[in-house]
Image (cartoon, helix red, strand yellow):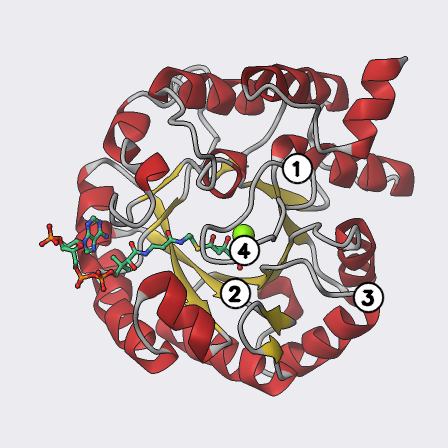
Amino acid sequence: MSRQVRIVEVGPRDGLQNEKQTIDTGIKLELIERLAKAGLRDIEAASFVSPKWVPQMADHAAIMAGLPSRETYPDVNYPVLTPNMKGFEAAAAAGAKEVAVFAAASESFSQKNINCSIAESIERFVPVFEAARQQGIRVRGYISCVVACPYEGAVSPEKVAEVAARLLELGSYEISLGDTIGAGTPASVLRMLEAVARKVPVQQLAGHYHDTYGMAVANAYASYQFGLRSFDSSVAGLGGCPYAKGATGNVATEDLVYLFNGLGVETGIDLDALVECSAWISGVLQRAPGSRVSRALLAK
Ligand code: HMG
Ligand code: MG
């Protein structure tokens, strides 16, 4: 059966970027391979950002060199984050076929996260889109703080729509809408989606919901009903953003798969293999999985 929703696994990037202990490249590569084995077909592998800003992602080139073999997993896509041309050039040299640029809908978060204004960030993305087009590399656009900002509070849906329209115009094949601090509820997420969908076709939107307040599954379900068919998540609910204090990980991939299984919506993911992967990485990090579904299934 073909996939009816696309789940973009961001655990190896969004999930691990905030870990204080340095995680071996070999562990990260094993995580990626286990995720591919569980059926994930979009696995965000690394960030080509400054190692001074995010030391955990400093091994990006080694990650790209050690990805699972194309023969075993011919159809897996490994996007990486690139904030500027320096990151793009390094990612392209490392063999990336898809990159993601990341903007924010809040000025303060943009400054804290990438050290420039929203407008300046877009200017930096223009040559990235141009070079990517020339080299046949796909670009995904992220927007952070689509509901609320850790520094400014509530964010206007119109501002999110404005940034989304610009990222679409520049050539993003999809715009991923990040509730960075997980403050959204179905009501605030739907208000945001209604504004964005007036500027960007719903088929080109993805939901990227962090689970700080336990609302991420509800937000994904509301977004699914609104028409979204692409969602970001991280195995075991790993993660947090180094520039969004107190924010927890993304919605757990297991929780999304369980939701969609219950709806009879095909994800292409083997829940048992995913739970096994969740238990393994949680063991490595010496904590219980942040996924309610994994905890329930592992307790059986
Ligand atoms: P800057 O300091 O303003 O950069 O940082 P700069 O251009 O002035 O350069 C300063 C130094 O950084 C120079 O090195 C550059 O070469 C180097 P030096 O001369 O001092 O030795 N540099 C780089 N090195 C490696 N890769 C690069 C790169 N660019 C410059 N690409 C910069 C600006 C954007 C680089 C920095 O702020 C940065 O790396 N920020 C990344 C922050 C980050 O990764 N945040 C987490 C990801 S976003 C997220 O999690 C949200 C998301 O999940 C959605 C959601 O949930 O909302 C996507
Ligand atoms: Mg995130």
Residue 193, relative to residue 35: is it above or below?
below
Q: Which of 173 and 282 is in front in this view?
A: 282
Residue bearing the label numbered 1: 237
Whole-percent x, y for residue 219 in the image: 78, 58
Q: Is mark 2 on a helix, strand or loop?
A: strand
Question: Marks 4 and 3: CB-CB under 8 Å?
Answer: no
Q: What residue type is labelled 4?
A: Lys
Determine crowd level at label 1: few under 14, some 14-19, many 20+ residues with C-alpha closer than 10 A: many
User: Residue at image x 65%, y 71%?
Assistant: 147
Whole-number angstrom distance, CA of label 4 to CA of label 1: 17 Å
Question: Looking at the image, is 61 positioned above or below residue 118?
Answer: above
Residue 43's spot in the image, x, y percent? 50, 36
Which picture quadrant has residue 262? top right
Residue 225, how many percent across, how many down? 83, 61
Circle on res. 186 = 3
Q: Where is residue 116 in the image (x, y as percent from the top left)?
A: 30, 73
Q: Earlier in the sequence, mark 4 or mark 1?
A: 1
User: Residues under labels 1 and 2: Cα distance?
Assistant: 18 Å
**Quadrant of the image for the C terminus?**
top right
Q: Nearer the viewer, mark 4 or mark 3?
A: 4
297 with respect to 235 (left or right)? right
Mark 4 vs mark 1, foreground winner is 4
Looking at marks 4 and 3 on the same chain, the residue that comes earlier in the sequence is marked by 3
- For image coordinates 35% across by 21% down, the residue present is 25
Q: Which residue is drawn at 19% across and 59% down?
A: 85
Q: What residue type is labelled 1?
A: Gly
| Residue 245, numbered circle | 4
Q: Is mark 1 on a helix, strand or loop?
A: helix
Q: Is mark 3 on a helix, strand or loop?
A: helix
Could you tell me the amino acid type at mark 3? Pro
For disc 3, the neighbor class at 10 Å (few under 14, some 14 to 19, many from 20) is some
Of labels 1 and 2, earlier in sequence is: 2
